[in-house]
Image: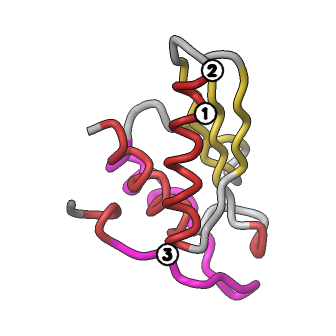
Amino acid sequence: MSGLAAERCEACTGATPRVTGAGVDAMLAELSREWKVEDGARLRRQYTFKTFAAAFGRATAIAGIAEEEGHHPDICVGWAYLDVTLTTHAINGLSRNDFVMAAKIDQLDR
């Protein structure tokens, strides 16, 4: 594990720096191409699976990582799909933690 996936999430406050512009582009380049930035404030990835159980299994694995890191995505699970959205609520935008979590989630694909 290297890069963002090797980092740990840090507790966020209202003073946590936002990631914007070139910072977003640089960190996004380390992630799966499936991750998209929405409104400059959210990082989102949509998955499709063959079954509900597979989608739920991935959601459960992501929940385990979120608990370890103390940084929790919004997760929506349905029949054969999973939507994962990361944002840092304390700053109403993206922080480094969002990209660290996305990189850790990407490790599940390996």
Quadrant assignment, res 90: bottom right
Q: Quadrant of the N terminus?
A: bottom left
- Residue at point 75% right, 73% down? 91
Residue range in magenta is 7-31
Magenta stretch encompasses residue 60 = no
Q: Which residue is mark 2?
A: 52
Horizontal side of residue 41 vs 44, given as left or right: right
Q: CA distance from mark 3 to mark 1?
A: 24 Å
Q: Which residue is mark 1?
A: 56
Q: Which residue is mark 3?
A: 9
Up-down relation of residue 27 to residue 19 (above or below)? above
Looking at the picture, which amino acid does disc 3 mark? Answer: Cys
Quadrant assignment, res 104: bottom left
Q: Closer to the camera, 56 or 25?
A: 56
- Residue at point 45% right, 57% down? 22
Q: CA distance from mark 1 to mark 2?
A: 6 Å
* Secondary element at tag 3: loop
Q: CA distance from mark 3 to mark 2?
A: 29 Å
